[in-house]
Amino acid sequence: MPPLTRLPLLGYGFRPFFLGAGVFAALVVPVWLLVLATGTTPLPGLPAALWHGHEMFFGFVVAAISGFLLTAIPSSTARRGFAGAPLLVLGGAWLAARVVFSLAALLPFALVAALELALLPLLAGLLAPPLLRERNRNLPMLAVLLALWIADAAFLAAFARADAGLAHRALLATLDVVLLLVTIVAGRVVPAVTASSLRRRDASFTTRSRRGLERALPLLMLAVLVADAWPSPAWLAAVLALVAAVLHAWRLAGWGSLQTGAVPILWVLHVAYAWLPLGFLLKAAALLSSAPWAAHWLHAFGIGVVATLILGVTTRTTLGHTGRALAAGPATAAAYGLLALAALVRVVASAWWPSQYFAMLLLAAGCWSAAWGIYLGVFGPMLLRPRADGRPG
């Protein structure tokens, strides 16, 4: 084996990116609180909240997506997983982008843009050959990566022009692309792993899939993306959100969520998906009425759906691909619970007790960082060490 491939951290695609996502997640929210407390403007000409949103997506979420795709696509194309030098290059590109973006106020814009926009094309270039060669069903993932790259480029253009409106639309589009990816991947993974696990306890257990619904949901999510990316009437975006809430809730109702309560590694996936219809309901209410209790709908998606699903998928993938049983121990279950609590506090408590807004913000941030700190404590050693069963990867 080449020397780099022998390093456990570079032995498979999920390892460097799941570790990087966990470290970044644990640190970025405390840094955001420091930015708020000091009134710092990381991106001159743009509100600090836009920097926060950008780093949550293109620092944390993109790292997790990269690790997932670098693991799932080799499995689906029956080829050996990526390892060694390619992972070193990709991981270096992600880390370099995070460093220069944190210093964007001090560095030349051309340098920031070049390094920030490098990772996704490199990732697509690595994944494209096996997907195209086998005409694999995951080919649309290349379009997802392109859409994320375009959104990042639009955000950088907004930064160069100090255009807060464009930057906000770019981040909304990024969120919608990620939610489209959640719709596709969760629709494949959640009912499958739920049925596989629960049938061991009850052979008659089954999940329900409706073909028309499965075809309609990705198209609906594309419509949501278009409505958010281009200026559209608020009522149109609200109607699309209401329809999305109903259809996602209908889909979830067929997955047997109430029977997963005794299996943390399952219920965390169902909790994450349950935030999807709830987030769309809150979005519709905020657009139609500016209701204060719905004001934090973005965090319903960001923490409730995306971060919780990432935690569930990274823990499950790490256990399975390091030769361990697919079971969440007490510490991992506690991390799931803390992240769920962070979502509730940030979305619900911050709205219902506005007089305690900053206290609720600190509580949510504490739960968030504690959850990812537990993740790093439990799964960091697994990511840094060889597989438990001695196999490569």
Image (tube, rainbow, N blue to C red):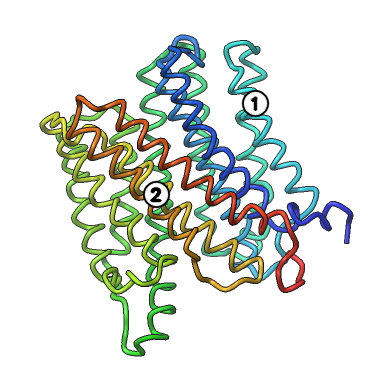
Q: Where is residue 231 in the image (x, y as percent from the top left)?
A: 28, 26
Q: Element at badge 2?
A: helix
Q: Quadrant of the C terminus?
A: bottom right
Residue matched to label 1? 99
Taking the image as shown, residue 389 lies to the left or right of residue 292, namely right
Q: In this view, does 367 lie above or below 331?
A: above
* Residue at horizontal 53 percent and vertical 41 percent from the top: 146
Say if 244 sits above or below 80 in the image. Answer: above
| Residue 192 percent across, percent down from the top left | 42, 73
Residue 128 visible in the shown view: no
What's the amino acid at mark 2?
A: Leu
Vertical comparison of 341 with 2: above or below: above
* Quarter of the image that includes the N terminus: bottom right
**In this rendering, is residue 51 above or below 384?**
above
Mark 1 residue crowding within 10 angstroms, few (<14) / some (14–19) / many (20+):
few
For the residue pair 337 and 247, the one nearer the viewer reads as 337
Residue 245 appears in view: yes
Earlier in the chain: of badge 2 and badge 1, it is 1
User: Which residue is at 37% across, 71% downward?
Assistant: 191
What residue would you read off at disc 2? 338
Residue 274 place in picture, x, y as percent: 28, 56
Find numbered disc 1 in the image and state the secondary structure of the residue it sits on.
helix
Do the residues under discs 2 and 1 have CB atoms within 8 angstroms?
no
Question: Which one is nearer the viewer's eye here, 386 or 52?
Answer: 386
Dividing the picture into quadrants, the one containing residue 250 is bottom left
